[in-house]
Each structure stands twice: as structure tokens, then as C-alpha cells.
Amino acid sequence: MPVRQIVMFPADVLEKTCDEVTVFDRKLTKLLADMYDTMIENDGVGLAAPQIGISEKIAIVDIDDQNGTIELINPVIIEERGVQTGPEGCLSFPGLYGEVSRADYVKVRTFNRKGKARIIEAEGFLARAIQHEIDHLEGVLFTSKVIKYLDEEDLESTEG
Ligand code: CO
């Protein structure tokens, strides 16, 4: 599967609302496979379709835990609780990191690749990654939510 080129900021496709997916076909399956390969190649924990130039409500999240790869198609947050604040980055902003506050828990209504509706619940870092990707589908970038930008030394201290 081909690794696609990541769209870097600034680009119009990153800042507009994506279209809903209406057709669940082999093309969608192939796109999800390409997105997975592109995310892995770039060491990401998530990727949204506009980041490869496709303005459709499709994203994937994989934080390398027991949940595996979560596919988000036309996702909507239907419930959220709590607040978490932590470092965040984005493949469309290489080398840029900042502190962002997000809900600590989210419940999301989404569809799988076959068009079946499902509910996903997540908390902590997984919830953060899901919210970051859903924002992409609305044309919202993490930089609009950064409280404080971090340099690499700040990052090391938050990790250690
Ligand atoms: Co991003």
C-alpha cells in the first residue's frame, strides 16, 4: 500500500470542514490502508484524511495499546467529561508541540468501514488523540487550542 504525502500547514484542506462519507466501498478500505501505512511511516498516533489531501470525515488513531487501530468515519462526540492538559503535536506541524486542554473522557458515535454505526469510549491519552483527529475533520487545528508552546527540553521534562 502506498504511503501518502502528508499535507503540511498552511493548506486550505487542513482548515475546512470535511464532507461526510456516504459510500462505504473498496475505495474507502484502500484509503484506510494507505492512511495506516502513512501514519506508521511517520511515527504518528493518528492521522486524518485532510492530512493526505482528502476532505472527507475519515481518521484513524493508534496509540499502540490493546485497542489497536481505531477507525473514525463521520465521528461525533456525544458525551464528554473532565479535563486533561498535556503536550500535543501534529504530523502537519513537524517539530511543533504545545500544551492543550481536552476532555478526559469522550463517548463517540462513529461508523466502521462497512457503514455500521458503533459507539467508542475513551479516556486519557486515547481520548486526547481521538479529539485531535475529530478536530481535523472540522478544519480545527491544535495550534488554535495551544495554551503554551513547548520546546524539546520541556517535552523531555514532561516525559521524565
Ligand atoms: Co494533527
Image: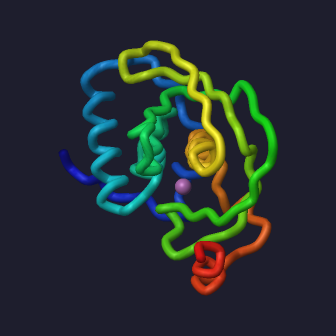
Q: As drawn, is 126 to the left or to the right of 44?
A: right
The answer to whether residue 129 of the structure is visible from this angle is yes
The mark total stands at 0
Quarter of the displayed picture in which ligand 1 can be seen: bottom right
Colouring rule applied to residues? rainbow
Res. 113 image quadrant: top left
Who's the residue at 25% across and 33% down the image?
30
Please determine whether, in this image, residue 81 is positioned above or below residue 9.
Answer: above
Who's the residue at 46% across and 35% down the image?
58
Question: The N terminus appears in which quarter of the rendering?
Answer: top left
Percent across and percent down for residue 71 are 44, 33
Who's the residue at 47% across and 62% down the image?
91
Q: As drawn, is 101 to the left or to the right of 61?
A: right
Looking at this view, name the residue that lies furthest to the left: 1
Who's the residue at 59% across and 77% down the image?
160
Percent across and percent down for residue 104 are 73, 45
